[in-house]
């Protein structure tokens, strides 16, 4: 009985870890000091190498810049007083909704 509970706990933990890993849609490759990411209901400082997840909002302030590289090779760069919502279903092309500021993108076609 005890081994059954341990096995069940381990399998649920592995399932949760896999689901969390699948949520990443890109990686921040450039983030100036004041760049923030809104994940859930909390603002965090964005640093290069941080995974960008579905539903994140990236915000830059003033003269700052941030760059996100997506799994398919596309790149999005934010500048100025910008806010962008990044969303994508697993395996789908990411969509970006610019709320304010400047956005420059280099998009690679799928496939």
Image (spheres, rainbow, N blue to C red):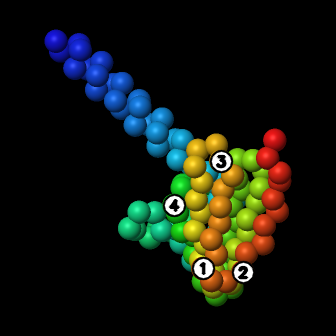
The earlier-in-sequence mark between 3 and 1 is 3
Quadrant placement of the N terminus: top left
Cα gap from disc 4 to disc 2, whole angstroms:
19 Å
Residue linked to disc 2: 102
Query: Residue 98: x, y in percent?
Result: 64, 75
Instruction: Tell me the quarter of the image containing the C terminus.
Output: top right
**Disc 1 secondary structure class:** strand
- Left or right placement of residue 104 versus residue 1 in this view: right
Identify residue for label 1. Answer: 99
Q: Which of the marked residues, 4 or 3, is nearer the chain's N terminus? A: 4
Sequence order check, earlier mark of 4 and 1: 4
* Position of residue 75 in the picture relative to residue 24 (left or right): right
Left or right of residue 70: residue 22:
left
Q: Quadrant of residue 53?
A: bottom right
Q: Residue at x 28, y 26 (%)?
A: 9
Report how far apart the C-alphas of labels 3 and 1 lie in the structure.
22 Å
Res. 51 visible in picture: no
Q: Which mark is residue 92?
A: 3
Residue 66 at x, y = what percent?
67, 70
Task: Check the image and report above or below for 48 versus 71.
Answer: below
Would you name the residue on which mark 4 appears? Answer: 55
State the CA–CA distance, disc 1 to disc 2.
9 Å
Q: Residues within 10 Å of mark 2 (few under 14, many from 20)?
A: some
Residue 86 picture quarter: bottom right
Q: Earlier in the sequence, mark 2 or mark 3?
A: 3
How far from the left and from the top, in percent, is residue 28? 65, 59
Contact between marks 2 and 3 (CB within 8 A): the answer is no
Q: Nearer the viewer, mark 1 or mark 2?
A: 1
Which residue: 82% across, 62% down? 106
Marks 4/1: CA–CA distance? 14 Å
User: How far is mark 4 from mark 3, CA to CA?
Assistant: 14 Å
């Amino acid at each position: 009985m005890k081994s059954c509970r341990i096995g069940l706990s381990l399998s649920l933990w592995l399932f949760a870890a896999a689901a969390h890993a699948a949520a990443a849609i890109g990686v921040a490759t450039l983030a100036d000091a004041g760049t923030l990411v809104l994940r859930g209901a909390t603002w965090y400082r964005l640093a290069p190498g941080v995974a960008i997840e579905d539903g994140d909002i990236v915000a830059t302030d003033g003269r700052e810049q941030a760059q996100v590289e997506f799994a398919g090779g596309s790149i999005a760069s934010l500048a100025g007083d910008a806010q962008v919502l990044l969303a994508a279903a697993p395996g789908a092309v990411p969509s970006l909704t610019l709320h304010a500021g400047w956005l420059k993108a280099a998009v690679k076609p799928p496939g």
